[in-house]
């Protein structure tokens, strides 16, 4: 690979991604390319209440609405709500403590913009849209209002870290179950956060999505009542998936990856299934992987066995396979390729996602283990994870450059990678 292509890719925020779109290039592909007066005056694609295709950067003048009977209809007259200045330019009021104590809070840092919050909400919920400046509707009767500033004295009262400078108040009717037994409270984060009764229904579903959003935005949730802080590690989302209509066979994918990952090998080589004759490079890679094979967990071997069962004889069409390669210093990456019944919800407006969709899932296997440790505490563990993130993003960039489609993270949010196609990969496009 060339020097430029060897640079590690970088996951870009939605703010960076949308700012990179030249003004006036957004178009309405859903309506034959016609551009309405509203779309011409909209200052930013993600400040519109209509759905924005965050994958293809296409702005639509229409919005989908579900009526009382469950019928989906197209609303051509959706009012745009301007959010005004960016978070760095506007003045926001401090969060009143009484309001904070009575509601769940979604807390983020100073760099998070409103349109990033909206983009993630739209990724998860069909109904998500701005209903007024500072009021983001999520789903039936549930809204986020804000942002409110979190000055030092307020953060201290709420037990929030200094990196969390603003908060959104969740307006959602509580839905709680029975009181959690004392002996079970330490076994689950939600049981600790809701000792008086676990949430269920809409409240629980919304909190789960907000937890995913918090991991993506390096934010946190503060739970009303208990005051429990749920702050996912933003670097814990290591694995990625590429969704595309294009199928690559195991030999073709291994060849595409070989320049960056010379030790990549078909997993069938490790479990005794016959495979096509090897090249000298593949034989060397097999010896390297066989040297670490005894360290592979029983769970990983079961995963490989399932992949073997899904694959037919070498002379016939393979409908599922897995490639393995060492990454970072002590980790491995498994790339599982197979067809899925449906693409993630975030891709629901992509036309290619309505047909056959292939998933290339790139999994991090720390020290050959399927289960990722819940806590990464030592400096060496964090360095290993960061190196693994870099290698997995590099592999995802190569696959995406060949197949097209979209890259999605563990939380089913879109990932934008800074990628380039060099001469080694252009032959596959």
Image: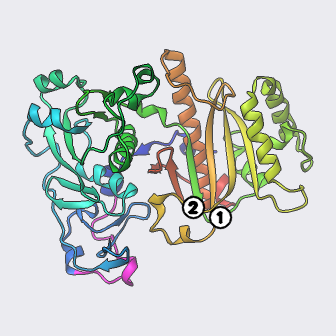
Query: Is 177 placed left or right of 133 in the picture?
Result: right
Location of residue 264 by image quarter: top right
Question: In what quadrant of the picture does the C terminus appear?
Answer: bottom right
Q: Position of residue 376 (x, y in %)?
A: 50, 21
Q: Residues within 10 Å of mark 1 (few under 14, many from 20)?
A: some
| Color encoding of the figure | rainbow
Per the image, label 2 sits on a secondary structure element best described as: loop
Q: Position of residue 23 (x, y in %)?
A: 27, 66
Q: Between marks 1 and 2, how big is the CA–CA gap?
A: 8 Å
Q: Is residue 231 visible?
A: yes
Taking the magenta stretch, the answer to whether it contains residue 323 is: no
Q: Are marks 1 and 2 in contact (CB under 8 Å)?
A: yes
Count of numbered circles in the view: 2
Q: Is residue 351 placed above or below 120 in the rendered structure?
A: below
Circle 1 sits on which residue? 246
Task: Report the residue at 44% width, 68% height from top.
Answer: 349
For the record, the magenta segment spans: 20-36
In front of the other: 394 or 313: 313
Q: Position of residue 208 (x, y in %)?
A: 39, 43
Question: In what quadrant of the picture does the N terminus appear?
Answer: top right
Q: Residues within 10 Å of mark 2 (few under 14, many from 20)?
A: some
Q: Is residue 106 placed above or below 314 in the rendered structure?
A: above
In front of the other: 197 or 290: 197
Magenta residues, dominant SS class:
loop
Name which of mark 1 and mark 2 comes first in the sequence: 1
Query: Is 373 placed left or right of 40 in the picture?
Result: right
Q: Position of residue 10 (x, y in %)?
A: 45, 42
Circle 2 sits on which residue? 404
């Amino acid at each position: 690979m060339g020097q430029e292509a060897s640079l590690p890719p970088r996951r870009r925020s939605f703010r960076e991604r949308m700012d990179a779109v030249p003004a006036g290039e957004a178009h309405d592909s859903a309506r034959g390319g016609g551009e309405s007066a509203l779309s011409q005056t909209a200052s930013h694609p993600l400040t519109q209440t209509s759905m924005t295709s965050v994958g293809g950067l296409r702005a639509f003048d229409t919005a989908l609405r579900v009526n009382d009977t469950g019928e989906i209809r197209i609303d051509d007259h959706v009012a745009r709500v301007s959010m005004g200045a960016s978070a760095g330019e506007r003045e926001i009021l401090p969060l009143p403590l009484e309001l904070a104590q009575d509601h769940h809070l979604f807390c983020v840092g100073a760099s998070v913009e409103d349109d990033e919050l909206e983009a993630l909400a739209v990724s998860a919920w069909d109904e998500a849209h701005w209903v007024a400046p500072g009021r983001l509707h999520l789903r039936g009767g549930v809204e986020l209002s804000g942002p409110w500033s979190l000055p030092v004295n307020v953060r201290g009262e709420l037990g929030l870290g200094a990196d969390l400078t603003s908060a959104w108040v969740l307006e959602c009717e509580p839905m709680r179950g029975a009181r959690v037994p004392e002996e079970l409270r330490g076994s689950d984060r939600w049981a600790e956060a809701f000792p008086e009764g676990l949430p269920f229904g809409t409240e629980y579903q919304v909190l789960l999505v907000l937890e995913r959003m918090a991991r993506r935005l390096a934010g946190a949730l503060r739970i009303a009542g208990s005051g429990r802080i749920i702050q996912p590690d933003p670097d814990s989302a290591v694995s990625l998936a590429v969704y595309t209509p294009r199928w690559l066979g195991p030999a073709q994918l291994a060849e595409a990856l070989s320049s960056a990952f010379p030790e990549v090998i078909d997993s069938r080589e490790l479990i005794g299934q016959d495979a096509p004759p090897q090249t000298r490079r593949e034989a060397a890679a097999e010896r390297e992987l066989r040297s670490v094979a005894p360290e592979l967990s029983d769970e990983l071997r079961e995963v490989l066995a399932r992949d073997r069962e899904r694959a037919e004889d070498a002379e016939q069409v393979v409908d599922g396979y897995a490639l393995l390669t060492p990454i970072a210093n002590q980790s491995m990456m498994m790339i599982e390729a197979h067809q899925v019944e449906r693409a993630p919800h975030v891709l629901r407006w992509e036309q290619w996602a309505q047909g056959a969709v292939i998933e290339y899932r790139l999994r991090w296997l720390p020290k050959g283990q399927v289960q990722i440790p819940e806590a990464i505490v030592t400096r060496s563990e964090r360095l290993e994870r960061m190196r693994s993130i870099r290698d997995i993003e590099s592999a995802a960039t190569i696959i995406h450059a060949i197949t097209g489609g979209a890259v999605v993270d563990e939380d089913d949010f879109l990932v934008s990678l800074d990628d380039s196609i060099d001469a080694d990969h252009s032959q596959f496009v």
